[in-house]
Image (tube, helix red, strand yellow):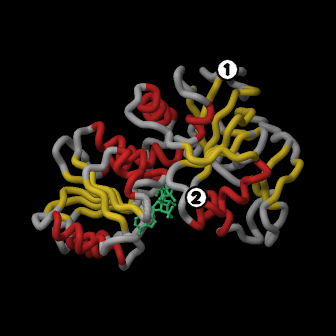
Amino acid sequence: MRAFAVWSFGEAPALHDLPVPAAGGAFLLRVAYAGVNPLDNNNLARLTANSAYPYVLGIDFAGVVERVPAGGSDLHAGDRVFGMARTHGAYAEYTAVTPGARSEPLARIPGGVTDEQAAALPTAAVTALRTVDLLGVAAGQRLVVMGATGGVGGYAVQMALSRGAHVIATVRGDADEARRLGAKEVYDTAAVEVVSALRAAHPDGVDAVLDLVSGPDAIRGDAEFIKPGGRLVSTIFAADEGWFAGRQITARNSASNANPLLSPQGLTEVASMLADGTITARIRSTADLADAGQVLAKLRNGGLRGKAVIRL
Ligand SMILES: NC(=O)c1ccc[n+]([C@@H]2O[C@H](COP(=O)([O-])OP(=O)(O)OC[C@H]3O[C@@H](n4cnc5c(N)ncnc54)[C@H](OP(=O)(O)O)[C@@H]3O)[C@@H](O)[C@H]2O)c1
């Protein structure tokens, strides 16, 4: 089968012909589309001489059940499914997923959702839902989403709007896209100094901030426009929770491996949101497997402004 993989430590990822996974006790899945996330670049950068090779890139996918593991399942061969293939990797014609593994959820794709859309959901949409939950986003609250036009941010903005929140977006050079998403206020880091602008616009402070982009130093600036008793979530482990607590702000670092929505139920919930129109997938790039390297570079270098998927 064709796979986009690193053959051995130190080599660049490339197209390789690999054996179809011997699924054994796992589901064997024929991949229709793989979803692309910053995590794919991060995992590539973290490879060491001790990693398992060949290393197939990617986690998120949508496709069809080819073989069900012994012991049975409520999924059957031929079912359309989507999920996360953390162990085997997803940028390949086939992948394997261990049933019940916490980090490898698998769920049916509901009617009305295409394979392409489903592949754009798992990591980003489930993270968006978790963070919106952690922030307790509710009607009338003012939520700032920093990095609002990216994969997680785009879903989070739409979910928060559906709860009736007043959504304030920060973006890098793409204010129109944030307005199209429905953000009521948009601050472009390319045009304004965002912390001062937000402090001036909200002197009493906002209720909550989802910060998808600020590092450990920059994120302290968020304290300047969050009200006392307000909440902050970082998806990149940038928040010093004790430092924010000293400023009457409840800060949380949302860890993907501690996300209870990484489950068939969590996947089904975000797919239902797509089916009922609460969210759209915002796919900005659909590339062939041979072009996976270019898609990853685009995500790394910026300017994608939505989701990318790879067509198998
Ligand atoms: N902990 C978890 O569970 C978890 C799960 C998923 C993702 N993550 C992490 O969360 C982060 C966001 O993920 P994602 O999938 O949304 O990434 P993404 O698709 O790359 O989106 C990030 C967005 O933020 C924009 N941006 C960059 N710097 C900015 C700034 N200073 N102000 C405003 N906007 C800025 C980017 O613009 P450009 O296009 O110009 O770069 C891009 O639109 C990534 O670091 C990812 O690794 C964590």
Residue positioned most to the left: 204
Q: Is residue 181 left or right of residue 271?
A: left
294 vs 133: above or below: below
Whole-percent x, y for residue 39 in the image: 58, 58
- Local crowd size for mark 2, using a 10 Å CA cut-off: few (<14), some (14–19), many (≥20): few
Counting the numbered discs, the total is 2
Instruction: Classify mark 2: helix, strand or loop.
Output: helix
* Residue under the image location 67 percent in, 39 percent down: 33
Residue nearest the viewer, comparing 201 with 125: 201
Residue type at tag 1: His
Q: Which residue is drawn at the image coordinates 75% and 53% (left, top)?
A: 291
Q: Is mark 2 within 8 Å of ligand 1?
A: yes
In the rendered image, the quadrant that contains the N terminus is top right
Find residue 49 and report its horizontal and vertical position in percent: 77, 71
Vertical relation: 181 (above or below) 296: above
Query: What numbered label is drawn on residue 39?
Result: 2
